[in-house]
Image: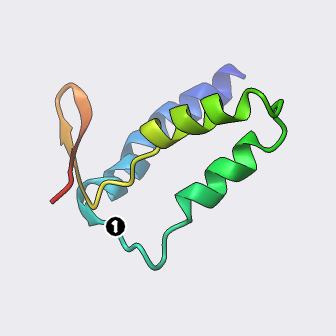
Amino acid sequence: MKFALLLLAGVLPHTLDLYTGHWKLDAAASDNIEKAIETAIEPINFLSRPIARGKLRRRSVAFPNMTITKTAEGFQSYMSRD
């Protein structure tokens, strides 16, 4: 197990560099958030579904723009609605 963690520690930062840059949401190619929420709450008790649905809707926001940068402290993301 330690070997796997050391291996990931060496590979992970280089792999994450691929995600740096500015990203724009392609709504046509993106998953349907409402459908994903309904699928996620399906096994939940029907009395709890409205609560779970509301919480997931508030937390599942697809921002149209996202910028990911790498700094000395790590990676930072900036999301905007415009």
Residue hosting label 1: 25
* Quarter of the figure that contains the N terminus: top right
Percent position (x, y) of residue 31? 55, 66
Q: Nearer the viewer, residue 18 or 56?
A: 56
In the rendered structure, which amino acid carries the disc numbered 1? Leu
Rendered view: 30 above or below 13:
below
The residue lying at 41 percent from left, 73 percent from top is 27
Corner quadrant of residue 44: top right
Q: Is the image coloured rainbow, by chain, by secondary structure, or in one colour?
A: rainbow
Percent position (x, y) of residue 79? 23, 47
State the SS at label 1. loop
Corner quadrant of residue 56: top right
The residue lying at 54 percent from left, 57 percent from top is 33
Percent position (x, y) of residue 62? 38, 54
Disc tally is: 1
Q: Is residue 13 left or right of residue 76?
A: right
Which residue of the protein is positioned furthest toward the bottom in this rendering? 28
The residue lying at 50 percent from left, 42 percent from top is 57
Label 1: few (<14), some (14–19) or many (≥20) C-alpha neighbours in 10 Å = few
* Quarter of the figure that contains the C terminus: bottom left
The residue lying at 64 percent from left, 54 percent from top is 36
Percent position (x, y) of residue 71? 16, 35
Q: Nearer the viewer, residue 47 or 66?
A: 47
